[in-house]
Amino acid sequence: MFVNSLYVVTAVIEAGAGLALLCLPSSAAKLLLGTPLLEPSACAVARVGGAGLLTIGVACWLARSDTQSSAARGLVSAMVIYNLAVVLVLGAAGLQFQQVGVILWPAVVLHTVMTAWCIVSLRNPSIADRLGSLQQ
């Protein structure tokens, strides 16, 4: 149940963020970073990022009932890397920029919590035991 909830929450958050970046990249950037994207190339890169986030959301949604396979462990491990990278990138941006968007620091906190949730999910003995018995 613990990992299932992680998948569902991740799916909703990342699919929503992905759709926002795909459909309204400049507005999403303004909310996050405090400034809109002015260059078409920046909007294109934001849309590529949005497609990646949407992909993470779909993968988590489709995996929501799989908590015991090696693929499930791989997905959660990848989510640790992703969430930690987001914390570092957005945290650095927040410290470097004079002005930030209204959702930057809440996003940093959210991704910090998601990183911890993923790590706890990976370290959960019941999950590790089930994965170990499947591999034998």
Image (cartoon, rainbow, N blue to C red):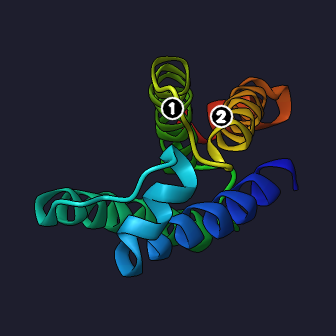
- Element at badge 2? helix
Picture coordinates of residue 126, whole percent (x, y): 84, 34
The residue to which callout 2 is attached is 108
Q: Residues within 10 Å of mark 2 (few under 14, many from 20)?
A: many
The residue to which callout 1 is attached is 90
Q: Is residue 69 left or right of residue 89?
A: right
Quarter of the image with the C terminus in it: top right
Judged from this view, the residue extending furthest toward the left is 41
Quarter of the image with the N terminus in it: bottom right
Look at label 1 and name its amino acid.
Answer: Leu
Q: Vertically, is 11 above or below 129?
A: below
Q: Nearer the viewer, residue 59 or 46?
A: 46
User: Would you say the residues marked 2 and 1 are in contact, meaning their CB atoms lie under 8 Å apart?
Assistant: yes
Q: Which residue sits at x=69%, y=53%?
A: 67
Number of marks in the rendered image: 2
Name the N-terminal-most of marks 2 and 1.
1
Q: Quadrant of residue 52?
A: bottom left
Q: Vertically, is 59 above or below 33?
A: below
Judged from this view, the residue extending furthest toward the bottom is 23
- Element at badge 1? helix
Q: Nearer the viewer, residue 133 or 61?
A: 61
Q: Residues within 10 Å of mark 1 (few under 14, many from 20)?
A: some
Q: Is residue 96 left or right of residue 84?
A: left
Q: Nearer the viewer, residue 101 or 14?
A: 101
